[in-house]
Image (cartoon, rainbow, N blue to C red):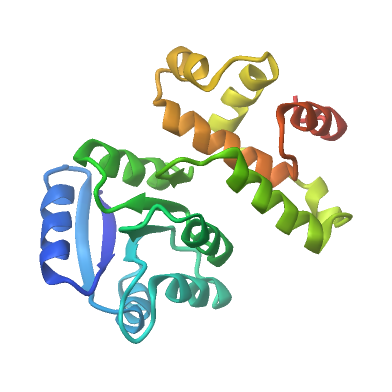
């Protein structure tokens, strides 16, 4: 059965373009559309999609707040945020709200589909340059709130993260890992970023130590 997708964007032309792109794929189907955040919340509850693709800037309720409200209600629908801006602030807010991904609107067709399939597959996808600065900002935020929280002891890694982690610990570069696993460098960067956030570390040395402490390998 095709993956059922909800589109939320206040521009009809943008929705039309995304719908045509997605429905060229036999395993993807757009089942609902919304033109603002309030309508998105209503449609998610009504059609229960497998994925919501959400524009950040929408009337009545912006995309980030709409995703936050979904999470507050306990709804776990994966959400991919769309934006014109490669902004660290927007990425941070999207992650904090509970989004599974962040994609720029000028992404290529190939990257758009890769992001959709990555998130549907249970992983996360963030477009743009996920720099060490961004990782450090997230780590500082996490440590400031819960530096000694016992909940951090329960770390669950995805299948792909478990493939990438030992290669990181061997000292392989992102490109070397991408070549060995036949994935894009951006995919490796995203998984490295996610693991560092989960483990509360900001560099490879801390990652190695934390992995040993938790017995993740």
In the image: residue 3, left or right of residue 102: left
**Residue at position x 33%, y 72% in the image:** 57
Give percent across and percent down for residue 92: 55, 58
Give percent across and percent down for residue 210: 81, 34
**Which residue occupies the extreme bottom position in the image?**
60
Q: How many numbered tags mark residues here?
A: 0
Compare residues 130 and 163 and report the one nearer the observer.
Answer: 130
Compare residues 136 and 31 and report the one nearer the observer.
Answer: 136
Tell me: residue 135, above or below residue 97: above
Give percent across and percent down for residue 24: 11, 44
**Residue at position x 32%, y 77% in the image:** 46
Tell me: residue 6, above or below residue 158: below
Give percent across and percent down for residue 48: 36, 68
**Residue at position x 18%, y 49% in the image:** 22
Quarter-of-image position of residue 60: bottom left
User: Is residue 158 shown to the viewer in this render?
Assistant: no
């Amino acid at each position: 059965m095709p993956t059922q997708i909800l589109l939320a964007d206040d521009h009809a032309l943008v929705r039309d373009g995304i719908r045509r792109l997605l429905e060229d794929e036999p395993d993807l189907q757009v089942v609902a559309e919304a033109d603002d955040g309030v309508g998105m919340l209503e449609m998610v509850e009504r059609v229960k999609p497998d994925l919501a693709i959400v524009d950040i800037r929408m009337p009545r309720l912006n995309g980030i707040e709409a995703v936050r409200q979904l999470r507050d209600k306990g709804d776990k629908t994966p959400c991919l945020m769309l934006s014109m801006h490669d902004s660290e602030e927007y990425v941070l807010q999207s992650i904090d709200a509970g989004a599974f991904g962040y994609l720029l609107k000028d992404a290529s067709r190939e990257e758009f589909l890769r992001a959709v399939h990555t998130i549907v597959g249970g992983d996360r996808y963030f477009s743009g340059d996920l720099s060490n600065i961004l990782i450090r900002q997230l780590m500082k935020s996490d440590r400031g709130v819960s530096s000694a929280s016992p909940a951090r002891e329960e770390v669950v890694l995805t299948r792909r993260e478990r493939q990438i982690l030992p290669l990181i610990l061997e000292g392989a570069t992102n490109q070397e890992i991408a070549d060995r696993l036949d994935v894009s460098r951006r995919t490796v960067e995203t998984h490295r970023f996610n693991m560092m956030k989960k483990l509360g570390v900001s560099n490879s040395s801390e990652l190695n130590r934390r992995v040993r402490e938790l017995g993740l390998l």
